[in-house]
Amino acid sequence: MLLRHTSAEPVERTGLMINPAKTCQPIGAMYAALGLHGCLPHSHGSQGCCAYHRSALTRHYREPVMAATSSFTEGASVFGGQANLLQAIDNIFTVYEPDIIAVHTTCLSETIGDDLNQIAIKARDEGKIPEGKFVIHASTPSYVGSHVTGFANMVQGMVKAFSESTGKKNETLNIIPGYVEPSDMEEVKRMAGLMGLKTIVFPDTSNVLNAPQTGKFRMYPKGGVTIAEMKATGDSKATIALGPLASDLAARKLDAQCKVPCHTQELPIGLQATDRFVDTLRKVGGVSVPESIAVERGKLLDVMTDMQAWFYQKRVALFGDPDSLVSLVEFLVALDMHPVHVVTGTPGKAFEQKIRDLTAHLPVPVNVKAHGDLFLLHQWIKKEPVDLLMGNTYGKYMARDEDLPFVRFGFPIFDRVGHSYFPTVGYMGGIRLMEKILDALLDRKDRDSPEESFELVI
Amino acid sequence: MSDEKNTAAKLEKIKAEILAKYPTKVARKRAKQILVNRSDTNGKMPEVGANVRTVPGIITQRGCSYAGCKGVVLGPTRDIVNITHGPVGCAYYSWLTRRNQTRPESDTDENFMNYCFTTDMQDEHIVFGGEKKLKQAIQEAFDLFHPKAISVFSTCPVGLIGDDVHAVAREMKEKLGINVFAFSCEGYKGVSQSAGHHIANNGIFTHVVGLNDTIGKGKFRINLLGEYNIGGDSFEIERILDACGISLVSTYSGNSSIDHFANSHTADLNAIMCHRSINYMAEMMETKFGIPWIKVNFIGAESTAKSLRKIAQYFEDEELKAKVEEVIAAEMPAVMASLEKAKPRCEGKRAMLFVGGSRAHHYQDLFGELGMETLAAGYEFGHRDDYEGRKVLPSIKIDADSRNIEELHITPDAKRYDPRKDEESLKKLENEGIDFREYGGMMPDMKENTLVIDDISQFETEKLIEIFKPDIFCAGIKEKYAIQKSGIPMKQLHSYDSGGPYAGFKGAINFYGEIERMVNAKVWSFITPPWAAEPELSANYAWVA
Ligand code: SF4
Ligand code: SF4
C-alpha cells in the first residue's frame, strides 16, 4: 500500500493540508505568460520558486519552459527586491532579447510588498526597457487562491498592459480559453474558424508548449498571441471568456478598459457546455452554425448513444480545477454517470454550490469540497467506493491502492503524453474524453471477466 | 604552436565570445566562473568562482535552500512526517519526484514518502502569523499518524513574518513526547540548494544523530553519506555491500529511516559519495564520535570496485578483502559483456555534464568507461573545493551568503568519543594509499583544455551546443527539452529520466545501455525532412518499376 496511513474515517482538519489538489499562483501566471508571443516570464523572488515552476511545467508539457528570476538572497528579502528586478530587466533584454517580460510576484516579494508597477515605471524611466519592448506584471501571492488564480491574474495583466480601444469596433471576437491545454486553445480557435469567425485567442500556448521538433531551439517559439493582436482586443466586438475562475477577471477588465462586452461561461467540456459555447459564438458573432459543426456534434452524440450501457450509473471520484470540474461533472451526469466525490484544492464556496446544483437530482449522495485535499478524497473513496477515478497524475497512488480504473485529466500530468496534442474541449474533445473513460472501464471489465465471459465484442 | 595551445586559445576565444553578450558587470562576474581547465607553468590549476550569487535575470539551473533541505536531504527519509510550513506551492513541488524511492522493511512499516504535508498558509496567517496554524498542523499529524518524528521546513514568507518554528517544534516535542524539529531553510538563504543541504545536515546532527547507542550486528559497519537513492541507486549499492558482508548502519539519506540516523554514530567508517552535500556531517561525526571518513564513488564499475577495495583496506581484514575480490570477480563479467556491446557504438563521442555538486565529476568515470570524452562540465551548486579539491578549503573566502548558514561547533562527546583508529594506524593506511578526509575535485580529473563552467546559464548552454554539437548533454529537467529541440540527446542526472539505477555494477550496465541507446537513437537522423536536404526544386518524370 502506497498510502498505507490513510484511514477511512475523515476527521476535521484546520491546520494540516495532506496531498494538495492545487498548487501556487505563480505557476499559473508563468503558464499564461508563455501564451504571449516573444514573452519571457519572470519570477520576482528567490530562484527556488522559479526553478520549481519551470520544472513542473516542463514535466507536464515536455517542452522548454523558459523563465528568469530575480534570484533574491537574504539582502533582497530584507531591503526589498527593487534593485534585483531593475538589474534583471536590464540583463534579460540584453541577453535573452524578448519583446515582453511578464513579471509575477512570489510569496516572498509579495510579503515584502514590492510594488511591481512602480518598479516597471522606474525601469522605463531609467532606460532599461528598449523602445518597443514591454514589461508587464501581475501580483500572484500564493497564500490566496491557487495556480488558477495566478493564471487569471496574469491574463488580466495582459489586458491591462496591452488592450487599447481606437474607438472603432470591428467584427473580431476575443476568446479567453481558460486554464486549458495548448491543444484545447487550438481547438477553440479551430471551432470558431469553422463558424467563419475572426478571433483573437489569448493567452494561446499552442505551438509554444506543443512546438514541433525542428532541430533548432527557439527561445520564443512561433505560437502565442502577438502584441498587435493583444492591442487589438480593445476594438473587438465582444469577449467570450471560458471558465469563470480563470478568464472572467480579464474579460471584465477588458470591458471596463475598452468597453468590450463580455460573455463568461463554463469551459466547453462535454456536450451541453460545448453547445452553449457554439450558441454564444453564433449569437455574439452573428453567424449561423455551419453543417461541419453540426456533424461534429452528431458524432459525439452518436458515441454517447452507442456506449451508454457502459457509463450508466458508474460511480466516479474527481479532483481538479474548479472550471474544468464543473463542466466535467455536467458531462458525466449527461452520460448518466454518478460523480459522487468531487474535490478541488482551490478555495471558493461557489464551486461547491455549482456541483450541488448539477448533481441535485442524482439518486445518490454527493460529497463536494472546495479547498479540499486528496487525503480527504481518498478517505471518501475508502468509505464509499467508486468505479472510476479522474484527476491529475497524483491520483495514481490512490488508484493503485484502491485498485481503481484511473483517467488522467487536468494539471499536472507527468507520466503520460497526449494532453498537449489532443483536446478535451469541444465536440471532438468530448469523444476523446469518452474514449479515455471507456478504455479505462472496459480494460477493467476485460481484466476482471471470468474466462467464459471474456468476449471479443462488447 | 602545439595542438594543445591551439585548443586552449580556441577555448579562450569561445569564452570571450560568450562573455561579449553580457553587460559588463555580468561579464566580469561570469569570467571567473568560466574556465579553461589548464594548469599554469607552475602546475597550478586556475581558481574558479563558485558558490556565488546568480545574477538576477540570468536563467539559471539552480533551485533554493528549501529544495536542498526538504527536497534532497530529508525527502528520501520515509518515516518522518515532513511538514512544509508555508503556502501550498513549495510542498507541492517537492512531493514525489524520481528521488523518492524507498523500501520499508515490512508492509506495516511506517512510510510517509508518498504523502505531502503542508500548512497551506492563507493570507490571514501571513498577516497575523502562522505559529498557531503550525502547532495545529503538528497536532493533527500526530493524531492521524502517530509518527516517531515530525519535522518542519520553513519557506520564504515564514522567515519574513518571523514565525519561530524552532520554538513551536520544542513546545510540540514536549507536549507530544515524540521528536519534533524544525529547519530554517527559507529559499532565500545562501545562493543555491547547497545552503539547504547544510541546514538539513546540521539539523539531523543536532536532533537525531546519537539518540540510539545500540551496537548493531555486523563486523564491518559503515555509513554511506551523500547517496540519495535516485532511480534506486542505493538499492544497488546496498545489494553490493551486503554481498561483501559490509553492514550499512545508515544511508544519508536515500532509502533511509530516522532510526538509522539515530544509530549512525555507532558505525566504524563514513564513506562519502556526494561530498558537496554532506562533508560537514562526516567531519562533525569524526570530531564528536571519532569515526574516520573517506571519499568513495559508486558511479562507474571501476570506481565501484575501487571504492569497495578501499573500504576493505580500511578494515584491514583479509577475509573481507577476499570477499570483496570475489564479489568484484562475480560482477565484472556481466559488466564487461555489456560494455563490449555498448563501447564500439559510443567510443569517441563527446559529452557535456552540468549537474549537481559532484555528479558532473562522478559520471565522467562512466563516460570514460564507454570511451567517451567530456568536453565541458560544471556544477549547479558546487563550491570551489568540489572543483579544485579539498585542499583549497582554507583559502575560500567566506562571504555574506555563506555566513548566514550556521556552522555548528562540535567537540568530542564526553562518553562516546571513541577514535576507531589511532593516528598511527591512520597514517599507516594513508601510506598504503587511503586518503582520509580528502577529495580531489573535478578539475584535476578532467583533461587539460576542457571547459569548466560554474552555474551555467541558459544562454551559455545554447552557445556550447551551437559551437561544439556534443553527442550527449547531461543536466536537469529544466534544461532537457531546450537541448533536445537543438537535436542533441539530453540525459537527466539529478533525477534520472526513464532509467536507473546507475550506481554500482548493475547500474553501470544500465548506464551503458542507456547511453548507447541515446547517442545512437534513429530519431535524431530524421530531423531534416527529405525535401529540406535537397532544396532545389527539380522534378523528374519517371516511372519506376
Ligand atoms: S514560496 Fe510561494 S510562490 Fe514560491 S513555490 Fe512556495 S508557494 Fe510557490
Ligand atoms: S550530486 Fe548534486 S544533486 Fe545530487 S545530492 Fe549531490 S549535490 Fe545534490
Image: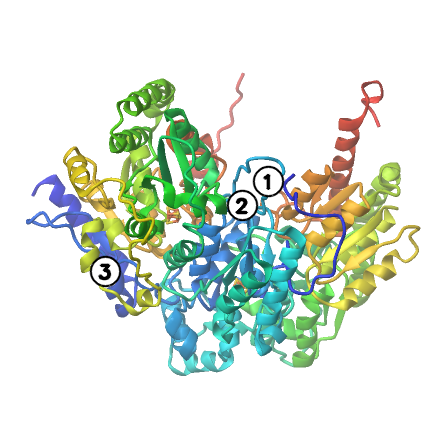
C-alpha gap between disc 2 and disc 3: 43 Å
Respond whether the residues carrying marks 2 and 3 are from the same subunit: yes
User: Who is closer to the viewer here, B195 or A444?
Assistant: B195
Find numbered disc 1 in the image and state the secondary structure of the residue it sits on: loop
Find numbered disc 3 in the image and state the secondary structure of the residue it sits on: helix
Q: Estimate how packed mark 2 is, as few (under 14), some (14 to 19) or many (20 or more) residues with alpha carbons within 10 Å.
A: many
- Percent position (x, y) of residue A311? 85, 41
Label 1 with label 2: CB-CB less than 8 Å = yes
User: Who is closer to the viewer here, B80 or A161?
Assistant: B80
Give the residue type that dot 2 points to: Arg
- Chain letter behind tag 3: B
**Residue projecting furthest to the front:** B415
- As drawn, is A376 to the left or to the right of B176? right
Which of the 4 image quarters holds residue A322? Answer: bottom right
Mark 3, residue position: B31
Mark 2, residue position: B78
Q: Estimate how packed mark 1 is, as few (under 14), some (14 to 19) or many (20 or more) residues with alpha carbons within 10 Å.
A: few
